[in-house]
Amino acid sequence: MVYDLDTIRLPAAWRRLAAPLDVASDELVRLDERLARADPVLAEGARARAHLFDAQAALHLEGELVALEDLVLHEAAMDVRRPDLALGRAVAVLAERRRLAAAAPGWAFSAEGWALLAGSDPRMPDDDEGGGSLEADAVDDNFAAIDRLLARTRRTLAAHEAGAPIPAGAAEDDPVAAWRRVLDETRDLPAVLAAAVALDAWLVLDPAPRQGHRGPLAAAALLRARGKARAHLPALALGLLRESRARWSRALPLPERLAGLLGAVETAARLMARDLDRLALAREVMLRACAGRRRTSRLPQLVDLFVGTPLITVASAARALAVTPQAVEGMLAELGSARPRELTERRRYRAWGIV
């Protein structure tokens, strides 16, 4: 399949894209600067929650509903119900997103990073597999097919990095090579528009079948690599899910599709900025409960644990603060109504979090 970018270089297309491009770029840069300058606890808390929100949204876009509380509790091995296949997929998406966020900005487009984006992850259960445990579903993946795909991807990347052009026929036959060619053609475009084009091409070409969540991840990684999101990995799946002004459809003209995707970039940045505000307010309210405490009180540190991590248990707080579980129980009682929501709804093995 051939993906033609010529239409967006026409004056009419630029007029259509100029306004949404400016708004999306401004919103994204403003958020990134806020995160870079924010208190590290607040910034890390916002990033940690963005990973969760984006993984949940990626599954929602594929028609799978995963409760945020279930995802958070599963990560802490505190499930309140039996994990299902959708939850297993959400955990895998979350792991991929965290891996990209922790890597260097350009890592996603190295041979190893591209193997993550374009290859089939053996930890990701297949959609058409039914029943069984999450571990069994993962083991049943076709490793031989994965190895062949990764080997072909590495050969393509090695030839590209050596300066060899990608043959036109290969680009038409191989969606991976075709998407890579589109990515090369966006180098002269503004970074945010290039990311929108990369995401649109991913949706059209489908270089990683049944791994549609990797398209928004690839576009977010491109924004990092181009320097537009140095302090965070944009939550573009969340932006796609919440962007109500336009829904992506292959039937729409390319400029209209790109305008909608630019709106998703804007929405993702705006939602993360709103969550940063929410965390800052929650921290301020909890810190008021610390007023008048002794200087040696660990209560302010407990507040920062709540802000910086999505979920806290008595045991995890006791380990982090080097106090007894009884001391943590006392501090939780001191927070009173300012204490975050309890997530498990159980008498024992409870957990609290701002999610």
Image (tube, rainbow, N blue to C red):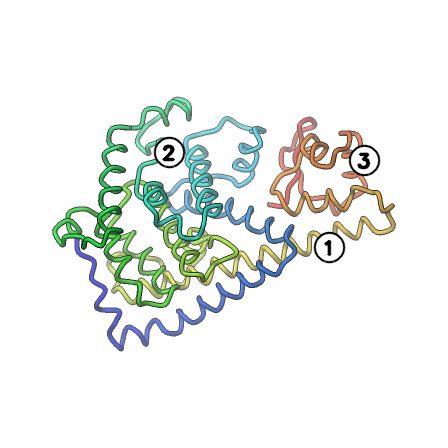
| Residue wearing tag 2 | 124
218 versus 123 height, above or below: below
Q: Residue lying farthest left?
A: 169
User: Where on the picture, by quarter, is residue 135?
Assistant: top left
Q: Earlier in the sequence, mark 3 or mark 2?
A: 2
Q: Secondary structure at mark 2?
A: loop
Q: Residue at x 14, y 52 (%)?
A: 167
Q: Is residue 202 left or right of residue 108?
A: left
User: Where on the picture, by quarter, is residue 126?
Assistant: top left
- Distance from label 1 to label 3 (Cα)? 20 Å
Between 228 and 16, the residue placed more toward the observer is 228
What amino acid is at disc 2?
Met
Q: Are marks 1 and 2 in contact (CB under 8 Å)?
A: no
- Distance from label 3 to label 2 (Cα)? 41 Å
State the mark number for residue 284.
Answer: 1
Q: Whole-percent x and y of residue 229?
A: 47, 59
- Crowding around mark 2 (Cα neighbors within 10 Å: few <14, some 14 to 19, many 20+) is many
Q: Secondary structure at mark 1?
A: helix
| Residue wearing tag 3 | 330
What amino acid is at disc 3?
Gly
